[in-house]
Image (cartoon, rainbow, N blue to C red):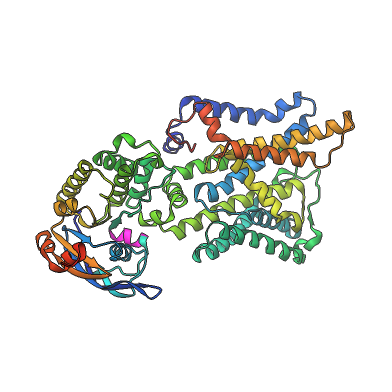
Amino acid sequence: MNAWRRLTDGVGSGPMRALGVLAALLLAAPFLLRILPAGDYWLSILILVLYFSYVGQAWNIMMGFAGQLSLGHALYLGLGGYTAAALYFNLGIGPWLGVFAAIAVAMLAGGLVGYLGFRFSLAGVYFALLTIAFAEFTRILFDHFKWVGGSGGLFLKIEPEGSALNLQGGPLLFYYVILALAAVAFVLCRWLLTSRLGYYWLAIREDPEAAQAAGINVLRYKMLAVVVSAGLTSVGGVWAAFYSKNLYPESAFAVGRSIEVILAPIIGGLGTLFGPIVGSALLVGLGDLFTALAEKLANDYGIKIAGLKQIGYGLALLLIVMFRRDGVWPWLSRRLGLHRRAEDRS
Amino acid sequence: MSGAHLAVHGIGKSFRGLRAVSDVAFDVPSGAIHALIGPNGAGKTTCFNMIAGVFAPDSGDIRLDERSIAGLRPDQICAAGIGRTFQIVKPFMGLTVEENVTIGALARTPHVPEARAQARQLLHDLGLGDRRTALAASLTLPDRKRLEVARALATQPRLLLLDEVMAGLRPTETDQMVAFLKALNARTGVTILLIEHVMRAVMALSQHIIVLHHGEKIAEGTPEEVTRDPAVLEVYLGQE
């Protein structure tokens, strides 16, 4: 009960009820969506939204909370996915066990990146370059790593009779797993922000020198941010590997994949809990909208514009970043009258 | 809680061959209020930074209650019982006033509610109680200075290093700060070492003044002694 009070401290009854309704809607979504035409399609969209809000939440711990820019989170996604998938493929160890190995591997990698970067006081873009470099050379390493299929990739068999115990099943299974992950990450981040650790991260983000003078071991807490973020991210990688059932070094560790991870929290609002969720819904929605628009123009009017989707998507992002510098959520929460303090992190 | 005894033994520091501080020694007894004065570039802040662990002295030793603290990291120095403010204030801009001070209080307790309660009390004592939910970035300079003091005090220091906390304050605000620091010193016995240009504050607060010039100590003594010292007069007023 104490934990519940701590998590909900300072949250009004209105927002709590709204959260409850949202949770109920998400739980019932697969069944509600069946009423719609193309319900399966809408479910797959919702799955993407939840996936990006989950990994966005994990990345946000590093950048939004502790102020450390990582542009190489594909490293942890890829390592997580490969670890669990290779254990299952080669040794028959199921992903519910394999995920712990995945978390351990990703945390080790995060610890290494963090230690090299922070021990030698790399900050800002220089640290970000290091994170890209690690993701890139891991990609090249995996190209030659025969145990996981090398550059030819790793394919998980589709097991129609496979059970949830091996994370095998239809969209419904993957929907509920990613929903659970997104919910856990949300609650965990709220918990972290109300803990000493969270306060320390914010202090380091705001001013590392003043943080240190206030008694904070800056190296230790930055390391913790990377390791926690890497571990959480890797679970998303495991989920994604079993969802797509194929892994290539070229895509698993791609820079583009790292960028995908960071867009939702940036658009939604860095350092906020709802930022990654709102950002993810907005981005997946916009991407889908422009795909549909391009298709409609091509099919109904015979107008084919190459790259229309990418241009539209890019322009939309540009406009959001220009007009909502702090992200959409801080603005939205003010609009909804949710913020009770000068600044709102919840 | 009582004050700590600071002993500085012949510390020196060079930056790329340029001597910023050389062979400076002084002593601040437990519970005393001492001031470090001198013209710009005298090495006052460099001395502070060595005591606070921002850089290690090239030579000499710094002892807090007989324990050597020279070369420790700033967070270790804070844990040892030294709190500091920055000459150019460094509040956590994006956080609220209360969060700023709570972070300081968390140095002594892992419990956030307890740290928050301590922060509120300190903010109340420093006259920032009604600003506690405001963002630090929205504060005026005098309020930011007070916030710096509150955050440093929240770490429950036994020695407080104040780097020009009166600069930019109006006379009435200076008097308030002086009264607060005097009361704090009387109540808790915390040792205070301050760098200050505002002589009105220096004279009102400190029992003992150390004068630096070109990185060297040129005089020390009571305010009366120091203001009559020919070497000090020369530095401040020029040769007759």
The answer to whether residue B7 of the structure is visible from this angle is yes
Give yes or no for residue A25 being in the magenta stretch: no
Task: Determine the residue located farthest toward the front in the rendered image.
Answer: B240
Q: Is residue A268 above or below residue B191?
A: above
Q: Is residue A87 left or right of residue A299?
A: left
Q: Is residue A78 above or below residue A260?
A: below
Q: Position of residue A43 (x, y in %)?
A: 73, 33
Which picture quadrant has residue B95? top left
Q: Position of residue A187 (x, y in %)?
A: 53, 40
Q: Position of residue A15 (x, y in %)?
A: 51, 27
Name the magenta segment's main secondary structure. Answer: helix
The answer to whether residue B5 of the structure is visible from this angle is no
Which picture quadrant has residue B216? bottom left
In the foreground, B163 or B212: B212
What residue lies at 55% left-to-right and 29% top-to-bottom? A19
Task: Determine the residue located farthest toward the right in the rendered image.
Answer: A302
Q: Is residue B115 above or below residue A34?
A: below
Q: Position of residue B151 (x, y in %)?
A: 32, 48
Q: Is residue B238 left or right of residue B137?
A: left
**Span highlighted in magenta in the image:** B75-81
What residue lies at 36% left-to-right and 59% top-to-bottom? B75
What residue lies at 51% left-to-right and 51% top-to-bottom? A67
Count of marks, rendered view: 0
Q: Is residue B207 left or right of residue A173?
A: left
Give yes or no for residue B77 being in the magenta stretch: yes
Which picture quadrant has residue A144? bottom right
